[in-house]
Image: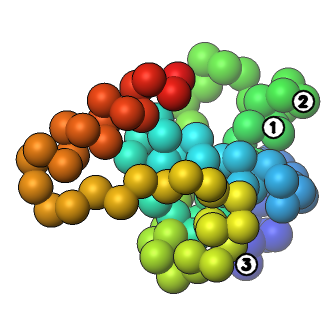
Amino acid sequence: MVFRGLKESKGVAEAVSDELILEAQRILARYEGIFVEPSGAASLAGLIKALNKGLIDRDDLVVIEATGTGFKDLKTISSYMVDVPIVEPSLDSLEQSLITLRGKD
């Protein structure tokens, strides 16, 4: 069904590397506050690749799905995330973590 839909709509599909998927996962977390598992970031990785190849214009309206919580695959996340702060459930702890993170940018 997917391939038929791609053909009928004259769409494209792109294979993406694990590295690009993990980068897309980081982008979603950092800039959108969305924590997805790697498979949930594959659509953004495909969009990035298509943009870089010129298959999609930067002015085009594009909708992607980002599904599957990142909590389902913490092992993968922990393999490349270091120094993840633990934020206690208090406003003071959150504020201190944000101050610390801002200093690392």
* Numbered tag placed on residue 75 in the rendering: none
Spot occupied by residue 12 in the image (x, y as percentages of width and height): 83, 49
Mark 1: amino acid: Ala
Secondary structure beneath disc 2? loop
User: Gap in Å between the C-alphas at discs 1 and 2?
Assistant: 5 Å
Residue name at image x 40 percent, y 25 percent: 102
Of callouts 1 and 3, which one flags the residue occurring earlier in the amino acid sequence?
A: 3
- Compared with 37, 31 (above or below) is above
Q: Is residue 65 above or below residue 29?
A: below
Q: Dot 1, crowdedness within 10 Å: few (<14), some or many (≥20)?
A: some
Residue 1 is labelled as 3
| Residue sitting at x 58%, y 79% | 73
Q: Are marks 1 and 2 in contact (CB under 8 Å)?
A: yes
> Which secondary structure, mark 3?
loop
- Quadrant of residue 90 in the image? bottom left
Cα separation between marks 3 and 2: 25 Å
In this figure, which residue is indicated by the disc labeled 1? Answer: 50
Q: Nearer the viewer, mark 1 or mark 3?
A: 1
* Relative horizontal placement of residue 78, taking residue 30 as reference (left or right): right
Question: Hey, what amino acid is under mark 3?
Answer: Met
Nearer the observer, 15 or 94? 94
Residue at the spot x=37%, y=33% of the render?
A: 100
Q: How is the image coloured?
A: rainbow
| Residue 63 rendering spot, x and y as whole percentages | 52, 45
Q: Is 104 rendered above or below residue 5?
A: above
* Kind of residue indicated by mark 2: Lys
**Quick one: quadrant of the N terminus?**
bottom right
Residue designated by label 2: 53
